[in-house]
Image (cartoon, grey):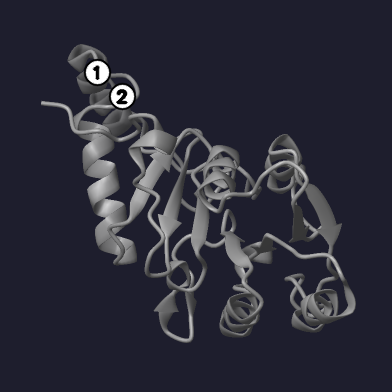
Amino acid sequence: MKYPLFKPFISTEECLQNLRSVFESGYFSEGEWVTSFREQLVSFIGNDKLVLTNSCTSALTLALRIANVNPGDTVLSTPMTCVATNTPILASGARVRWVDIDPDSGCVSVESVKRAFYDSLLPFKALVCVDWAGNPCELEELQKMCHDNNVVLIQDAAHAFGAKYKGVDISEFAYMTCLSFQAIKHLTTGDGGAVVSGEVGASARDDDLVGGTNSDID
């Protein structure tokens, strides 16, 4: 017996019925289905500061803009990830400085981040950490180090939808957490993503940046 590794399960008949409803509504990228999806995500995660995007890459791009990452800034990140994690940093005009990973988890090494903070004379604007293979990073320690050094923590949680860290949803720790609903993720919409605001004072629901995303439709 063969088991496909990357074939998502979709109830074909139910999906086709729902697609008919979408096509007949006239709203292909917004509308009641998107509103309902967002409401269910908010309920599941327990955080209503959530905006849907067309991809996790777009979510990361939005998070970097909200974090005020500008050309010439330096952002710490990991090479142990999909290229889409780091292309938004380069697209913003910022520079990437690599930090190492923990060989046991594949996630960003706390010690490597600590060395980057204390061994460099350059200021860092943000740290992008990746929850490798669904394993949350050491979020409490990274959160504290970033706070102490005035660095924004952005979490690429493309692999980790629904994950918890010490019993708490992972979106509660980073300034911004980015989710993926790409074809082979835990939850798929074919493609798509979301950015979730974690810390007090952070808000992804900024109309100037989101550009009308997820606006209410009567």
Question: Decide: marks 2, 1 in contact (CB < 8 A)?
Answer: yes
Q: Position of residue 212 (x, y in %)?
A: 33, 29
> Which residue is at the front of the view, 187 or 166?
166
Q: Position of 136 compared to 205: left or right? A: right
Q: From the viewer's perspective, is residue 126 above or below residue 33?
A: below
What's under tag 1, amino acid-wise? Arg
State which quarter of the image contains the C terminus: top left
**Residue 86: x %, y % from top left:** 74, 47
Relative to 12, is 156 above or below? Answer: below
Secondary structure beneath dot 2 equals helix
Q: Which residue is mark 2?
A: 16
* Rendered image quadrant of residue 16: top left
**Nearer to us in this view, 176 or 93:** 93
Q: Identify which residue is drawn at 45% across, 66% down.
A: 171
Residue that label 1 marks: 20
Q: Residue 20 placed where, x, y %?
A: 24, 18
Whether residue 218 is situated above or below residue 185 in the rendered picture = above
Amino acid at circle 2: Leu
Packing grade of label 1 (10 A; few <14, some 14-19, many >=20) is few
Residue at left offset 48%, top offset 33%: 54
Whether residue 175 sits left or right of residue 41 in the image: it is right
- Whether residue 111 is visible here, answered yes or no, is yes
Q: Is residue 108 above or below residue 183?
A: below
